[in-house]
Structures are given as C-alpha cells and as structure tokens.
Image: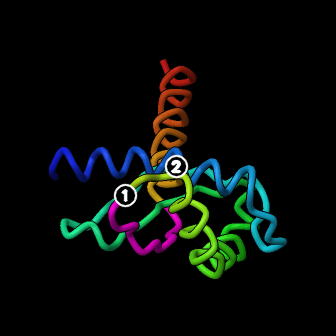
Amino acid sequence: MTIRQQQIESILKRTISNVISRRLADPRIRGLVSITRIVVAKNLKDAQIYVSVLPAQYEKRTIVGLNSAAGHIHRMARESVALRTMPHLEFRLDASLKKQAAVLESIGQANRGKDLNP
C-alpha cells in the first residue's frame, strides 16, 4: 500500500463518517454506524468502506441503505475533499469485529472455567 492510498483512506474515513452521522437522513440507515476501515484500490478509482452497525438487527437494512445512498454520499464527500478523482464507494459489513468478540468471549469462558476447577 502506498502512502498516497493511506492518506486518501484516512481523509475518506473522516469525511464519510461525518457525512453519515450529520448530513444523511435516510430512514433505512438506523442504529450506530461506524466505519471500521477503508480499502482504496491502487488506481484510486474504487473504495470499499467496511462498516459496523449496532444493534445487529439493523445491519442488512443499513448496508442496503448506504449502498443506495452511495452516490449522494459520494457527492457530499466530494464537496468537502479536494481530490482530483473521488473513488467510487461501495459499503460492506465488517464481520471481523463480531468474530473478534466471539473469540474474546470464548477465551473469557475458558478462563472462568479454569477458576472454578482447581
């Protein structure tokens, strides 16, 4: 990954987070939406935005809403960021946080089991 890609990812993360939290009024986007990471293609034309949605019951509906509003989010972010070309945005659900939480819960249960059995 180039330094330029990292800079663009950082700028996009801040800008898109701001757009989603403050300037987007889509009823399909519900719950707490957090951008966990952004992956920008080497040619800087595409960006995959990984999001986490809480509570879990709103995940699918929110991802559909975000992808439907991607053009609008793209336009609003373009107004805030001075980039020659703004990448095409694609929103995806980040399942890594759930996996991480499940592993930590399993470790916690195993440790609690050790404490009970001397």
According to the picture, the residue beneath numbered tag 1 turns out to be: 83
State the image quarter where residue 29 is shown.
bottom right
Q: Is residue 113 above or below residue 47?
A: above
How many neighbours does mark 2 have within 10 angstroms: few (below 14), some (14-19), or many (20 or more)? Answer: few
State the image quarter where residue 20 is shown.
bottom right
Element carrying mark 1: loop
Q: Is residue 12 above or below residue 88?
A: above
As rendered, which of 23 and 96 lies closer to the eye? 23
Rendering coords of residue 72 (x, y %): 63, 73
Gap between marks 2 and 1, in whole Å?
39 Å
Left or right, 14 with respect to 30, comes to left
Left or right, 67 with respect to 55, comes to left
Choose mark 2 or mark 1, whichever is in front: 1
> Residue 109 colored magenta?
no
Rendering coords of residue 110 (x, y %): 48, 35
What scheme was used to colour the molecule?
Answer: rainbow
Amino acid beneath label 2: Ala
Label number found at residue 102? 2
Element carrying mark 2: helix
Q: Residue at x 61, y 63 (%)?
A: 76
Q: Is residue 80 above or below residue 70?
A: above
Label number found at residue 44? none
Amino acid beneath label 1: Leu
As rendered, which of 118 and 88 lies closer to the eye? 88
Q: Which residues are magenta?
A: 83-94
Q: Is label 2 in contact with label 1 (beta carbons under 8 Å)? A: no
How many neighbours does mark 1 have within 10 angstroms: few (below 14), some (14-19), or many (20 or more)? Answer: few
As rendered, which of 75 and 49 lies closer to the eye? 75
Q: Earlier in the sequence, mark 2 or mark 1?
A: 1
Q: Residue at x 58, y 75 (%)?
A: 70
As rendered, which of 79 and 45 lies closer to the eye? 79
